[in-house]
Amino acid sequence: MSEDKKALLIVEDDTGLQSQLKWCFEGYNVLIAEDRESAIAELRRNEPKVVLQDLGLPPDPEGVSEGMATLQQMLSITPDIKVIVVTGNADTDNAVRAVGHGAYDFYQKPLDTEVLQLIVQRAFSMWELEEENRLLLARNASSPLEGFIATSDKVIQVCRLIEKVAPTTATTLLLGESGTGKELLARALHNLSPRASEAFVAINCAAIPENLLESELFGYEKGSFTGAAKTTPGKIEFANDGTLFLDEIGDMPLALQAKLLRFLQERTVERVGGRKEIPVDVRVVCATNQDLKVAIADNRFREDLYYRISEVTAAIPPLRDRPGDAVVMARAFLQENAAKQSSPLRNFTQGALQAIETHEWPGNVRELENKVKSAVIMAEGKQVTAADLGLDVAGTGSYPMNLRAVRLEAERRALTQVLTITDGNISKAAELLGITRPTFYNLMQKHDITETA
């Protein structure tokens, strides 16, 4: 077999099914095992990333005890492996048990080779995605976008924009809902800039009372107001030669906006109660969760200031609009926090993953991270459940235990994703999925998907 082919381990004692499955997955480097001992040997020898395993294995071919034991032993050796268990017709209970023990997915006989191919391909794709994330975490100490996980195209574009604008002096505006990671991107912009060795000073314009914000930003002279016992430089001066991050700038009072505009134009500050203009060399990055154009129309934000702070604008999409990011982030947060808490938790149940995918995440990444942190502390089982995360599975679209519904959803998602990747090119899409054009067209018709999907 070619070394370029992905290794797929099939654990099945029926020689007829072995041949059928080997033919079905001829595009892979297929490894065959008949029982637990040979399966573990193949696992150690060839390190396959995906396993297709029958639950009925000798010496208990009519039961599932040996199959369950094989599953658990494989996961104990390689926790990241994706095991798809194969069960008898209508044997949903044992399939769910296997998923509860850590199986990635399940499939019930009789075999539908095209559906099984999609499930296996999806398992390889998920392993590769998680491996990318593991590599990202491993090198996050030197990563310019430290702590910012991006897998969806929209967010990757934002990261590329940050990398491109960082070496310049352009004033940058970060737009996004609360919890989307605006400060992380601001810090990444600073760390990638020539000012990285200087100070990064952040101030939340919404968290400081209006009567104190001016002195906090610009500083004050001794005796300028009651309690001003000594001359104190402001945040802008502290950020000299570095980066000033003005978070929630949309909440800045109008009167102070005028003074900030003058600073941006003149690059000098005048302390409260002072007369001296102090030159400051600082890179300014602003962020807000508000629509500043609406604020301008409502006379809550100065239009001239808006154009001054938005020389470059980066819009960060909310988590609900970032397909795939929530699950990848959740796994990363689980790995990070389990290590900190010395917890054996390494994975989520399928129900938890479904809840993560379908939850709206109004608090975005911050909400997700907090829920995973809490779950690591509260979870009592071997895997994190939806209940551990505080997510209502029923309310977010419970995991369908009807296998037909699972198959249909997997098919439709694979078709729409591959059409997006290939920009609607049917030939390329069919090639990526490893099926013929007629079969692809039949699946499109089955799911009512147009060529422009």
Image: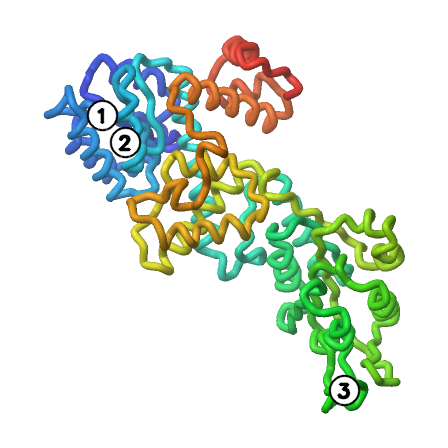
Left or right: 418 as drawn, with respect to 270: left
Q: Secondary structure at mark 3?
A: loop
Q: Secondary structure at mark 2?
A: helix
Between disc 3 and disc 1, the foreground one is 3
Residue in view at x 77 percent, y 63 percent:
252
Residue under numbered circle 3: 226
Given residues 355 and 438, the one toward you in this image is: 355
Neighbour tally class for label 2: few under 14, some 14-19, many 20 plus, Cα within 10 Å: many
Given residues 343 and 230, the one toward you in this image is: 230
Q: Quadrant of residue 428?
A: top right
Residue under numbered circle 2: 98
Q: Position of residue 283 (x, y in %)?
A: 74, 66
Q: Position of residue 249 (x, y in %)?
A: 75, 60
Q: Position of residue 26 (x, y in %)?
A: 36, 19
Q: Quadrant of the N terminus?
A: top left
Spatial separation of the CA atoms under disc 1 and disc 2: 9 Å
